[in-house]
Image (cartoon, rainbow, N blue to C red):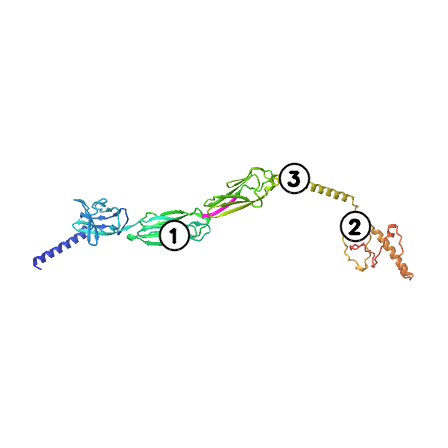
Amino acid sequence: MPPSEQRSHRGGRSVVALLHILCSITGVCCSQVVVPQRVSAVLGKNATLECRVEVGTNLTLTQSSWERRLPSGSVTLAVYNPLHGISIPELSHRLYFRSPSSHDATIVLENVGFADVGIYTCKVATFPLGNTQASTTVNVLVEPKVYVSAGSTALIDGGNETVVATCIAERARPPAEVSWESNLFGQSEVQLFDEVNGTTSTQVRYLWQPTRHVQGHALTCVVRHPALLNDFRIPYQLNVQFAPDISVVGYDGDWYAGRENVQMTCKANANPPAHHFRWIRLDSEMPEGVEIINSTLLFLRPLQRNDSGVYRCEVANDINLRSRDVRILIQDQSQAERSNSIAVAGAVMGAVLALFLIVIFIIVILTARKAPPPAFTDKVIDLPPTHKPPPPYSERAPTIPLGVHASQVAWLCQNRRAERRYELSDGQRPSTTRPRLQSPTQELSRLEWVCHQSGTDHVYINHREHYV
C-alpha cells in the first residue's frame, strides 16, 4: 500500500473511532426502529404494519421506507421523505402511510390476499449514522365460514343413537377450534379436511339417543379462531318426533242420571301434530243422542243409566296411533245428594243410639235402687284378720250362714262344751248324734252349727280367716 493510502486509511479509522466516541459521550447514535414480530391479517381485510421510529435528539431523519423480501430480491414498497414527500412505486392502489412523521412510518395494506404473505422491512435513514431497520412477518388468516346442518335422519323418540347435527367451520387458516355445548349425554366426533390455499375445514358431529323429554331444547355450536374477535356461537334447536300423548278432560266422576250439557274432549301432545281423532265405545254400541265433533264427545241429551260404559279415544300422527280408555259410571244421584243422604242417615242412627243409651242408663239406676241393703255379717266378713293364724283346714267348721249374729254362735258353742263335759264325767260315750239344741232364737235350731274346740274360747266363724 502506498504511503498516501496508508495515511488516508489511518485517517478514516480515526474518524470512525472519533464518531463512536462522540456517540457514546453525546448520545448522537441513539436511534431505533420498532416493529411487531408478526402481523396476522385476515383474508380480504386490511393489515396494519406498524413502525415506530425513535431518533436521538442530535440525529436528523432523512428518510423512512418499507421493503418486501422476495425470492428474486428486495422490492421497495413505499418511501417517506420529510423534504420530498411520499413515494409508493408498488401497490399504490392498496398501500398508504397511516400518519407519516419523523417518529411514525406505519403503513396500511388493504384487501390482503395470500400473495401478501411474506417478510416486510422498515428502514430509517438518519444523518449522520445512516440506515437502521427492523423486519416483521405478515401471515394471512382465513376467517372460517360457520354453519350448522341437521342430521341425515329424523330424530325419533326412543330410537337408536344418531347424528343430531353437524357444526362446520369451513376453509379456515389456521384450522378453527369447534365444539358443542349441551347438557345432554351425547358425544362429539371431530373431522378435519384440507382445502386449497392451505385452509382447513373442521366438522364436529353431535351424536345422541333421542328422547321426547328434550323436545325444543337447544344445542350450541362454539367456534374459536384467531381471525374472530369473539367466539362464534350458533344455537340449534332439537326437533324430536314422538307419538301422541293423550289425555281426556271433561269427566269429573260425578255424572248422574239427568245431568245435562256434559262432554269429553281428547287432547294430544304430539310431534308432528296429530291429524286423526276418533271416539268409540268398547262394551256396546255408541248410544243415541251422542255427537262427535273433532276430538270432543258431546251428549246432546240428559244422561241415562245405560250411558255407563268404557269409551276409547284414538289419536294418530305420522309416527304412530295411540289410544286412551275412560270408564264412565252414571249414578242415580249426584255426589251432593248422596252426601246429604248419608248425613241424614247418620243423624238418625246417632239419635237412635243416644236414645238406647239413655234407656239403659235409666234401667241401671232403677235396678240399683231396688237392691236390699248389705247384712251385718257381710261387714264382719270384710274385717281384717287378727294376728293369730287360722286352724288347719281339716279342723275348720262349715261357714256360718249369713245373717246369724256372733253372740248366737258363742252361746251355742258354750252349751255344747258343757254337755260334753257332763257326758265325760258320767263315763258315757259321746253321743254320735247331736241333740237338737234349743236357743232363745228359734232360727238357730234350723242351722247346722259346728263348734271347734281348741283349748280356748275362740270360735272359728268362716273361711275368710276371721276369729271371734
- Marks 1/2: CA–CA distance: 107 Å
Q: Which mark is residue 407?
A: none
Badge 3 element: helix
Mark 1 vs 2: CB contact within 8 A = no
Q: Which residue is mark 3?
A: 344
Quarter of the image with the C terminus in it: bottom right
Q: Given the current orientation, which residue lies at the most extreme left position?
A: 3
Going by the numbered disc 2, the residue's amino acid type is Asp
248 or 294, which is in the foreground? 294
Q: Which mark is residue 205?
A: 1
377 or 149, which is in the foreground? 149
- Marks 3/1: CA–CA distance: 72 Å
Residue 271 falls within the magenta-colored stretch: no
- Based on the displayed image, in which of its 4 quarters is residue 360 positioned? top right
Mark found first going from the N terminus, 1 or 2: 1
Going by the numbered disc 1, the residue's amino acid type is Arg
Q: Read off the magenta span.
A: 241-247
Going by the numbered disc 3, the residue's amino acid type is Val
